[in-house]
Amino acid sequence: MTSGTGTRGPYRISIPSRSDPLLRLGAERVGGPVGRHADPGRIAPRWFTVDRVLILLTVCAAILAVLLKNPCRVEGWSSPDYFYRACYSDWAELYQSRGLGEGVLPFITPGVLFEYPVLLGLLASATAVIVDLVAGSAPADAKALLYFDVNTMLIAGVWVLTVLATLRLASRRPWDAAIVATAPVIILSGTINWDLWAVLLATAGMLAFARNRPVLAGVLWGLGTAVKLYPVLLLGAVLVLALRTGRFRPFLLALAGTAGAWLAVDLPFLLRDMAGWTYFLTFSESRDAGFSSGWYVYNAVARQLGAATLPPAVITAGAAALFALSCVGVAALTLLAGRRPRFAQIALLIVGAFILCNKVYSPQYALWLVPLVALAIPRWRVVLLWQLVEAFHWVAIWLYLGGRTSGGAPEHNLGLGPYSWAVLAHILVTAYVMAAVVAEILAPQRDLVRRIGIDDPQGGPFDRAPDRHTLRGGGTRPVRPPGIPARLAPIGWQDRGDTAPVPAAHGSGSEHDGPVRGGSSTRPVEDHQ
């Protein structure tokens, strides 16, 4: 196992049962953490490699996701039953309501309006064609079920690829990809819509960037933006890193790749059918606040209290203004921090701010954050708290929608009060994750990823780059010539109780990351794993 990008050194990989307090406590109940004589990352396992174990975990999680949707697979997708059974999926709903089963294909059939970006519409059309070829003249319900199953199988493969991309990005912490492989929010919401396709393209783009291929990264982000908007936000993280390091070429190359890929997908459909192509933009701009956004809760409570509500135009402008201010805040944090933040940390803050400020929120939007959380703050206590609250919100939204949109039986419904508390909990826990990232940016010695002299495994051309422009003053920082590697981490266990300095990363604002914690003969030291 190697670590970092560019010049690399062999590091013993981090083992969660040793390094994470929560998992170490759990490991004691099932036999204890990995033994002290094990040498993960330097002695190859036989069959059960990290990659294969994570693939198995992902497959098991995907099967569980299908089982959760099985009530609708057996009984069919009908309102409001699919809310109360918590098995709603846009796939079956769009297939039945938008004429996909009757040969109406978004962005292909002239005059069809579809409220999603082009590449997502093409995915919807392609899977509809597959179902038509396989099912032929089968009943509509059978074809809707097959449409769901085809998309589910494709999403399972996308999920596996996302896990493997996260594993490659995680450097000496490959087991952090288990956060993606076993994520409850993916199990619950991964089969609602096509968002995991965008997550894969965004994560694969980060991997390309980490390997110093900014054009390819931009191409993947451009394709992701043609599925869902959020992958383009990763360019914001590249921009602020370029501002701090003075290296603008990677940003310009990534921007060119993003724009080129997006135009290659969208421009033919824009020229062919302007009204159909712009419908996604006009629909997003003019629609009212979506369920589970803070804007929706405000308007719903205001209506109950007889207060003034916010019209769609004001909400759109307010959401854009808040997000712009959030981006300015992230840029200021990046330029003020004593040590340059990591790419994944900045990306999580930008995407998280977009989710919180946006006037639309759907349960599957939490998927956007899962790989970023795994890379930015791989602390299982934080991860599980966040996902537990998101699961609580996932249940609340269906019970609320059952009564609000479908006139379901009152005894099955959740009122505005409890639902509003669930939305508030979702907002607060997302803000909590972002605050935890900010805390580690301000105190980089607490960053689990940056132990033993590692700088930014996802930073690509910014990894170990010196500072050029900061708001702290003091000029540029000294940087080790690129041909000289950083001191390699000690391998094995540290039995002494003394401390030793950790080598500073290039461009660090301090001389070292902090002390390496001592250990004993019975307790591992995370810094040396």
Image (spheres, rainbow, N blue to C red):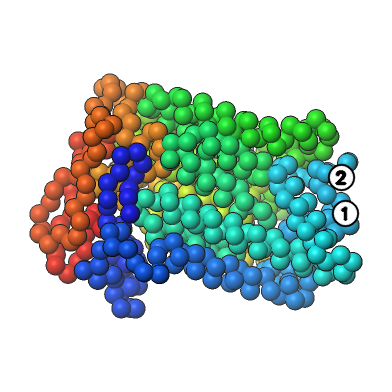
* Labels 2 & 1 near each other (Cβ < 8 A): yes
Vertical comparison of 436 with 380: above or below:
above
Provide the residue designation for mark 1: 103
Going from N to C along the chain, the mark reached first, 2 or 1, is 1
Q: At which x and y percent is residue 270?
A: 78, 32
Q: Secondary structure at mark 1?
A: loop
Q: What residue is at 24 percent from the left and 31 percent from the top? A: 480
For the N terminus, give its image quadrant.
bottom left
Provide the residue designation for mark 2: 109
Comparing 132 with 316, the one in front is 132
Q: At which x and y percent is residue 66?
A: 64, 70
Quarter assignment of residue 86: bottom right
Instruction: Tell me the kind of residue under disc 1.
Output: Gly
Comparing 343 with 299, the one in front is 343
Q: At which x and y percent is residue 111?
A: 88, 41
Q: At which x and y percent is residue 437?
A: 40, 46
Q: What residue is at 83 percent from the left and 66 percent from the top? A: 135
Whether residue 473 is visible to the viewer of this picture, yes or no, is yes
